[in-house]
Image (tube, rainbow, N blue to C red):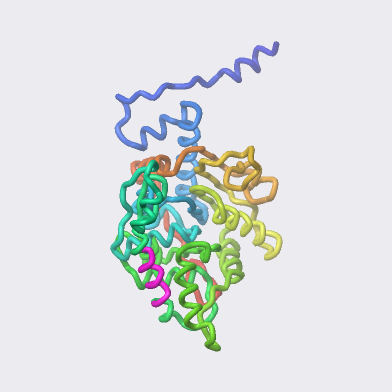
Amino acid sequence: MDLKARKRILSTPVIPVDVRSIHGVGDLLESFQRTSVQARNLGRCFQVWKNMLTDPKRPTILLGLSGPLIAAGLRSVIREMVELGMVDVVVSTGAVLYQDLYQSLGYHHYMGTPSADDGKLRAFAIDRIYDTYVDELKFEETDRTIGRITEEFPPRPASSREFLQFLGERFPAKDSILATCARKGVPVFSPALIDSSIGIGLTLHYAANRKKPNRFALDAVRDNFELVQILNSSPRTGVIYIGGGTPKNWINDGIVMANYAFERQGEGHYYALQITTDVPHWGGLSGSTLDEAMSWGKVSTKATKAMAFIEASVALPLLVGALWDRRAEWRKRRRPSFTWNGDVCARA
């Protein structure tokens, strides 16, 4: 037996969480780093995110959002991440952004139960998201509002970023994620935007305008081109994935596309963290590990990375609260500024 190797392996003891010595969420997440299982993983995610924010090379931080985040009560948490400069670019499913817009119009999510009689809910025009209810009648009003407001957009093809900025400017609710991104100049992309109720609103607009020679249309390939320009101007990038799905895949594909198709002088993402409830052994992307992403060149072989298998309604407030506790360490960070001339991006 190699006693020296054995001693090295057994050199770092687990330290139990001492609740009496914890004076804030920052203390709690730091104490998690010397525990085990998902607490340790969440503590490591906190450290990775803090490393992104304190890196003097100012990596561009891209946030991927998927799952029932607004229904879970995370709207203000996500908005604060943008307001406080914790992220620089947002990539989201259309559903997250739609429900942000739904609340901007003054509508609500309601506490419900997963054991509800769904047939009865259907009769009452109430939709259920696990233990949360939404008003189907107000959803329909929101869909039709999107269809009508799109009449104000220039009748031409546009990227999802351009259209979502337009929505954020037209509905400037102070608690809105979209409105805050528009005000702060944070690009918001949704590469599968039509796979959401925003897509329903756009379909209503299409039906009313389909015979016109010029009309609004989403240009999904332009989304790719715009993302690549952001990545090309970013020698170092960090990614935060809340859930997985299309946002994770699209951001990861973007760095590969920028590196081999557009000759970006860089590598895969230098920092990466993910919060997910999916698991690797089914082979799906949402649960695939950040180590697996290294084989594709999506995450750098030198990356600082962490992954926690925890539901987002628990994990994200803890992470953001801990970063707020430690804001003195990163508040001087200057967020990159993106200026758009059509589909051409300039960065400062």
Residue 331 in sight from this viewpoint: no
| Picture residue at 38% right of the left edge, 48% below the top | 72
Residue 297 percent across, percent down from the top left: 68, 50
Residue 161 percent across, percent down from the top left: 49, 68
- Mainly helix, strand or loop, the magenta region? helix
Which quadrant is home to the N terminus? top right
Residue 179 in sight from this viewpoint: yes
Residue 313 percent across, percent down from the top left: 40, 43
210 or 119: which is nearer to us? 119
Q: Quadrant of residue 283?
A: top right
- Relative placement, left or right, of 155 versus 269 is left
- Relative placement, left or right, of 234 versus 112 is right
| Picture residue at 34% right of the left edge, 58% below the top | 135
Name above or below for residue 339 compared with residue 111: below
| Picture residue at 32% right of the left edge, 29% below the top | 22
Q: Count of labels shown?
A: 0
Q: Quadrant of residue 222?
A: bottom right
346 or 102: which is nearer to us? 102
Q: Look at the image and give the residue range highlighted in magenta.
A: 139-148
Q: Is residue 113 magenta?
A: no
Residue 69 percent across, percent down from the top left: 42, 51
Name above or below for residue 92 compared with residue 160: above
- Outermost residue toward the bottom? 213
